[in-house]
Amino acid sequence: MYTLISATPSPYARKVRIALIEKGIPFTLQTEVPWHGTTATPAYNPLEKLPVLVQPDGTGIYESRFILEWLEVKHPTPRLLPDDAEQILAARQVEVIADGVCDAVVLLFFERLRQEPSAEWIARQRRKVEGGVRALAERAGDGFLVGGRFGLADIAAGTALRYLAVRFPEFDWAGQYPSLAAMSARLEARPSFAATVPVPQTITEKVV
Ligand SMILES: N[C@@H](CCC(=O)N[C@@H](CS(=O)(=O)O)C(=O)NCC(=O)O)C(=O)O
């Protein structure tokens, strides 16, 4: 059986958890604080990040986008990518935007932990979050994001949006983009989303 090394707030790990549940793949969840010295990530990932999908033989698959690609190859049904090549590219573009929003939120979060946070750096990350959410809003309609069925784009966009509530609650994206808020609510109603709602974690070791 697979083991997924995860963290309670992680949007990247949530993408993988949702994909595993949607595909009906059993797995053991190993929840960690990747910022603590006790994390297992270095044993599987030279980049020392989670999520890591640990195979029964102990091999670690890492980087959420690659884990999702790997799952699509190893467990192709139900398919989480569109059938059409252009639509696959569109879904991956959404994942790039969604992951980029999460990346900026992580940088924002840790900048705020510094003794003297840089206002310029925070402003730069906020712009990236706001720009990325705007790009998602431009794609949101009254159904799934790409190809008329649930898939990678919805997983990536949905996890990024819900992550904002955990780490960047002052950004009222739902009020600014009602279509995006409605899409998020539809996705969060899915059992795979309901089973993986992100919550903050307490980091007790000095990180920055
Ligand atoms: N691009 C990576 C990002 C993963 C990532 O940043 N993980 C964080 C945890 S979380 O932000 O997702 O909660 C981590 O392990 N950070 C530890 C470190 O960067 O040393 C992915 O998509 O998997």
Image (spheres, rainbow, N blue to C red):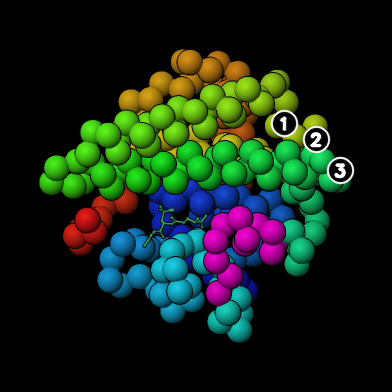
Answer with the quadrant where ligand 1 appears in the image. Answer: bottom left
Residue nearest the observer in this picture, 144 or 137: 137
Instruction: Describe residue 145's horizontal placement relative to residue 137 as left or right.
Output: right
| Image coordinates for residue 31, horizontal then vertical, percent | 42, 62
Q: Earlier in the sequence, mark 2 or mark 3?
A: 3
Instruction: Describe residue 19's horizontal placement relative to residue 103 as left or right.
Output: right
How packed mark 3 is, by other alpha carbons closer than 10 Å (few <14, some 14-19, many 20 or more), is few
| Image coordinates for residue 133, horizontal then vertical, percent | 52, 29
Vertical comparison of 44 with 156: above or below: below
Q: Which residue is mark 3?
A: 84
Q: Which residue is mark 2?
A: 147
How packed mark 2 is, by other alpha carbons closer than 10 Å (few <14, some 14-19, many 20 or more), is some
Tag shown at residue 144: 1
For residue 29, say whether it is visible.
no
Is ligand 1 within 8 Å of the beta carbon of the residue shown at mark 2? Answer: no
Badge count:
3
Q: Earlier in the sequence, mark 1 or mark 3?
A: 3
Q: Contact, CB < 8 Å: mark 2 with mark 3?
A: yes
Mark 2 or 3, which is nearer the eye? 3
Q: Contact, CB < 8 Å: mark 1 with mark 2?
A: yes
Q: Residue furthest front?
A: 120
What is the three-letter code of the residue carrying label 1?
Phe
Vertical comparison of 195 with 64: above or below: above
